[in-house]
Amino acid sequence: MGSPLETQRLRHERLTKVKGLAVFGADALSSSAYATEEILRVLVLAGVGAVALTVPVSLAIVALMAIVAISYYQTIHAYPSGGGAYIVAHENLGLLPGLVAAAALLVDYILTVAVSISAGVAAITSALPELYPHRVELALGFIALITVANLRGVRESGTIFAIPTYSFILAFGAVITFGVWRWLNGTLPDLTPAEPPAQVQPLTLLLLLRAFASGTAALTGIEAVSNGVQAFYPPEPRNASRVLLLMVALLGSFFFGTGVLAREMGILPREEETVVSQIARAVFEGSWPYYAVQAATMLILVLAANTAFADFPRLASILARDRYLPRQLANLGDRLVFANGILLLGATASLLIVIFRATVHNLIPLYMVGVFVAFTLSQAGMVRHWWTERSGQWRLKLGINGFGALCTAAVGVEVAVIKFLDGAWITVFVIGSFVVLMRAIHRHYEDLKHQLSLERAKLPRPFRAHKVIVPVNNVHRGVLEALRYAKAVSDDVTAVYVEIEPGAREEIERKWERWVPDVPLVVLPSPYRSVVGPILLYLDQVQREAGPDTALTVVLPEFVPRKWWHHLLHNQTALMLKFALLFRQRRLRRYKVLADVPYYLTR
Amino acid sequence: MGSPLETQRLRHERLTKVKGLAVFGADALSSSAYATEEILRVLVLAGVGAVALTVPVSLAIVALMAIVAISYYQTIHAYPSGGGAYIVAHENLGLLPGLVAAAALLVDYILTVAVSISAGVAAITSALPELYPHRVELALGFIALITVANLRGVRESGTIFAIPTYSFILAFGAVITFGVWRWLNGTLPDLTPAEPPAQVQPLTLLLLLRAFASGTAALTGIEAVSNGVQAFYPPEPRNASRVLLLMVALLGSFFFGTGVLAREMGILPREEETVVSQIARAVFEGSWPYYAVQAATMLILVLAANTAFADFPRLASILARDRYLPRQLANLGDRLVFANGILLLGATASLLIVIFRATVHNLIPLYMVGVFVAFTLSQAGMVRHWWTERSGQWRLKLGINGFGALCTAAVGVEVAVIKFLDGAWITVFVIGSFVVLMRAIHRHYEDLKHQLSLERAKLPRPFRAHKVIVPVNNVHRGVLEALRYAKAVSDDVTAVYVEIEPGAREEIERKWERWVPDVPLVVLPSPYRSVVGPILLYLDQVQREAGPDTALTVVLPEFVPRKWWHHLLHNQTALMLKFALLFRQRRLRRYKVLADVPYYLTR
C-alpha cells in the first residue's frame, strides 16, 4: 500500500465553491442516473397508460427535495463546524437518537457504495450489453479498486474530483437540453413498444405511493454538504450553503427533465438497459455523445461511491473514539487513513453486491429507510436546537425544520411500510442491531476502564517464590533449550510428561536420565488420550500446594517452522494448552504465566 | 459427541460371510443404481436406435468386472492381512506408485461419498419429484448426518448394516426377476416416448467408447473386500474371497438385468427421474413395491457413503503414521475415531455436492479415473509380487493379474482421455498435487526429526543473567500485575512505552513516578504510529548489548475478557508483537521468550 507516512503530514485542503460542488455533489447528482427508473418500474405494473404519471410523481419528489434542502441550509448555518446527523441528533436529542442516526448513516454509506457501483456498472452494460452477464464481477472489481485507492490514501482533491462531476453535469445537461429542444421541435423519437407489457395491477393510490417511495432515491446524498462545511474557504457556512442550493437546483432539473423526456418518448424500464441510457441513446441517435454520457455517468457514480469511502471510516472513527465501536476503527494506519473502516466498508458493500446481483432495483428498498431515518433525526435535532436557542428568527427556523422533519418522517414511515417485505425489513433490523451492539460495546469499554482504574488500587504484594513447570512430549533439542531457559529464571523447575500410549514412559525416562538428570520428570497417565486435561489438573494441584505468594510459570518449548504451512503439520498442543489456561481456568483466577521458548527450525 | 471413551475399549468385530457381504458389498452393489443410466445418457446422443447397444456395452463391462474380481481373488489370498492398493503398490512397486495409489484412493473415497449420496437423493426425488429442487440441501443433510454419526463412532456392526444391503438385494432382485418374467410373458410395458429426442451425434466408435467409459461406474467398490480380509472369521482369505465372488455375481446380474430391461421397455434417461426408478415404477405399475425399491436403493447408497467414512480416515491415519499426511490425522479422538479424517471427508464431499449440484452424472467423470488408477496399481503390484515369489502356480497367477492390470490400465487411460474435459482433468490434477504434497510433508517431518535429534547434540551452555522487558501502553492494574511477575523472575526489569500521540509521554511518566518509581521506563518515539516496530528495534538493541549469555524475556500484560467477542474490541498489539517476534525476527535467532501475564476481567 506504499511506504508509511509521518503523522505530521496529516492536513486538509480547503475548497472553493466550484471544487466543493465537485466533492460534495457527486453523491446527490449521481442519483439522477437511477431514481426516475425506479418510479417507472412501479408505474408500469399498472400498464403503459400509468407511466404518464411519472411527471406528477417526480414533481412531488422535487418538492420534497426543496424542503430537505432548505432544512439543511439552516443546519449549515447553525453547525458551521460540520453538522452530520449523528452530531446534531446526539447533541440535541440525546444519546439514543444519536446512535440511531449513526447506525442509519453507517448503513447508508454501505448502501451508497453498493447502489452507486451497481448503477455505474449498469451505465456501462447499457452501452456494452455483452458485459451484462459479468456485472457482479465488474462491480466487485470497482469496489476492490476504490478500496485499494483509499487504503493508499486518496486525498480529497477537488481538482481531480472536478473531472467526473463536471463531465456529468455537462453530459447530463446536454441530454436534457437537447432532448427538450427536440421535444419542442417535435423531432423527439417515439420509443413506445409495439407490444406494450400487460397491466398486472390496478392503478391504485397504493401503487402511486410505492412509485413515490421508490423515486425518493433521488434525495440520497443531499446531506453531504452539511457534513463538510469546514472544508470550504471562509466564510464557510455561506459558501457551503450556496453550493447546497446550486446542487439541489441541478439535481432537481436533471431528475425532473429525465421524467418528462421518459414520458414523451414512451420509454419503459428494461432489464439490460437503464432508462437514462435509453433516453440518451434516442436523443443522440446512438452517436458518440451517447457514449460520452454513459462514461460520465459511470465516472460520477464511482466518485459517489468513493465519497462514502471517506465518510464511513470518518464516522466510524468518531464513534470508536466515543467508545461505541471497536477502537481499531479509530487507528490511523501507516498511510494516515482509517484502514480498518475502509476494509469493513469494502467487504460489506461487496457482500451486498453479491447477494443482490449488482442490481440497483434490488438494493433501493434497503437504501431509502436509512436515508430518511437520518434526515428525520437531523431535522428533529434542529427543531430542538432552535427551541433551546430562541434567538433571532427562531420561530421561522423552527417551523421550517419542523415541517422538514414531519415530511421526511412521513415519507420514511411510508417507505419502511410499503417496502418492508421488499427488503426494508433488513435495514430496520440492521439499524436496530447496530444500536444494541454499540451500546454493548460502550458498556464493555466502561467496565474495562473501571476494572483497570488505579483509583483505590493498592500495589500488589510481591511474590516470594517462583516455580517453573515444563510440559514435554519427548527429549529433543527444543526441550533442552526450554529447560535451559527455565533453569535461568528459577531454581525450582519440574518437567511433566503425559503418557498417552501405554508403555511410552520407559523410553522417555531413559533418555531423561541421560540428558537432564538434574530436572525432576513427572509422568501423568491419560486413559482418555487427552494431553491438556492431565496437565491442567497437575498445574492446579501444584498451585494449590504452593499458595498464592508463589509465581507459577509454564514454559512451553515451541518450534517455529520456516514455512507457514508447516504449522498445519504439527499437533497444536501448545496452542490448546494456552487457550485452556487462559479461558477454562479463569475460575481459579490465579496467575499462571505462559512463557514460549521458541526453537527456530532452519529447514 | 458423547462422553470420551477409554483407549482400551478399542476392539474389532469378526464377521460371518453373510455379514461380510452386508458390510463390504454395499459400495459395489449400490453402483447398479446409477451405472446403466450413465451408458444410456451417452448412447441416446446418437438417437433412440443406438440405445439398444446398452446390452452389448453392459456385457463388455460385466466381462471387465469378472477380470477385476478374479484379480482381487488372488490379492485376497496373497494378502490375508488386508491388501489395499496403497499397501500392495507400496510393498511391490515402491514408494511413488504407493503414494499415487494412496492419492487415488483418497480421491475415490471422497467421490464415493459425493456420488453415493447424490444417487441416494436421486432415488428419493424420483419417487417424490417435489423434492427435486431441494436435492443439494438434502444431500448436504445426509452427509452431515453420516459425519456426526461417525464422529460419535458407529461400530461397523454387521447386524445393523445387514438391513440396507439385504433389503436392496431383495428389492433389486425382485425388480429384475419380475421384470424378466413379464418380459418373457410379453406383458412388459413399452415406455418409448412418442416424440423421441433427436439424434445430435453420429453413432461412432468414439461414442461407444464413451458409453463404455461411463458404464465402468459399475466397477466401483469391488476392491472393498480385499481391504478388509482381517475382519472375517478364519479362514479369513477363504471366507473373504467367497464373499467377493458372490458380490460380483450379484452385481453383474443386477447391472446386466437393468440394461436388458431398459432396452426392452425403451427407457430413456430423464433429468428428474433415474432409469432404475423408471424401470421399477413400470414393472410394479407404481404400486407400493416400487416405493420399497426406492427406499432400499436410498438406504444402500447411504450405507455405501458410510463405508467411505470408515475407509478414508483409516487410510489417512496410516499415511499420517508413515508421515505422509499431517499427524493430526493419526490422532484417535475422544470417541476412539479419527475425528479429523472424518471431518475432512465430510467437508470435501459437501463441497463437491455444492459445486456439482448433487448430480451423479456431473460427478462420474471425476470418479472413474481414481478408481482405475487404484485398480491398475494394485494389479501391477501383484504381478511384481508373483514375480518375486515364484512358487506354486506363480506363472498362472502372474498371468491373471497381468491381464487384469493391462485391462484396467487400458480402460483407465481411455476414461481419462475421453472424459478429460468433462472433469477427469480435475482428478488427474488433484491426484498429482496430493502426491507432491505428501512428499513435501514427509520431507518436512524428516527434516524436523534431524533438527531435533540429540545425536551429536551438546547440552546448551547455561544462561548467566536474565533481563526482563515489559511493554506498557498505560499504567493500570494489569500493568502492575505484570510488573509484579517481572520483579519475581528477574532483578533486571525495564518497561518500555511507545509514544504515538505526541505529548502523551508526560502523563504516563507522571503516573509511573507515582506507582512504580523503582522500575525504569524507556519512552520510544514513533513518528509512523507503529507500536510493534520501535519495540522490536529496542529489543534487538538490548539483546546485542546484553550478549548471548543473557536470557531475555518480554513480559506482556494481557487482559482476558469475560466474553469471547470482547477480544474484538481490543487492539491486538500483544498478538502482533508475538507474531513479529516469532516470525520477523527469526533471522537473529536469539531466544527472546514471551511471557503472557493474564489479567482476568470480571465484567
Image (cartoon, coloured by chain):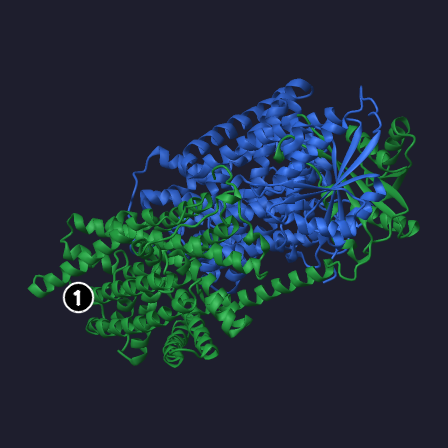
Chain colours: A blue, B green
Given the image, on which type of amino acid does mark 1 rest?
Gly
Provide residue A359's location: percent of width, then percent of height: 46, 50
Q: Residue at 36% across / 62% down in the picture?
A: B221
* In the image: residue A221, left or right of residue B468: left
* In the image: residue A458, left or right of residue A81: right
Q: Residue at 51% across / 46% down in the picture?
A: A352
Provide residue B290's location: percent of width, then percent of height: 19, 51
Q: Residue at 31% across / 70% down in the picture?
A: B65
Closer to us: B141 or A42: B141
Question: Which quarter of the rendered picture does the C terminus of chain B lie within?
Answer: top right
Against A568, residue B83 (above or below) is below
Q: Mark 1 = which residue? A: B266
* In the image: residue B253, left or right of residue B377: left
Determine if residue A209 is in view.
yes
Provide residue A433's location: percent of width, then percent of height: 54, 32
Question: Pointer 1: residues within 10 angstroms few (<14), some, or many (20+)?
Answer: some
Closer to us: B464 or B70: B70
* In the image: residue A243, left or right of residue A178: right
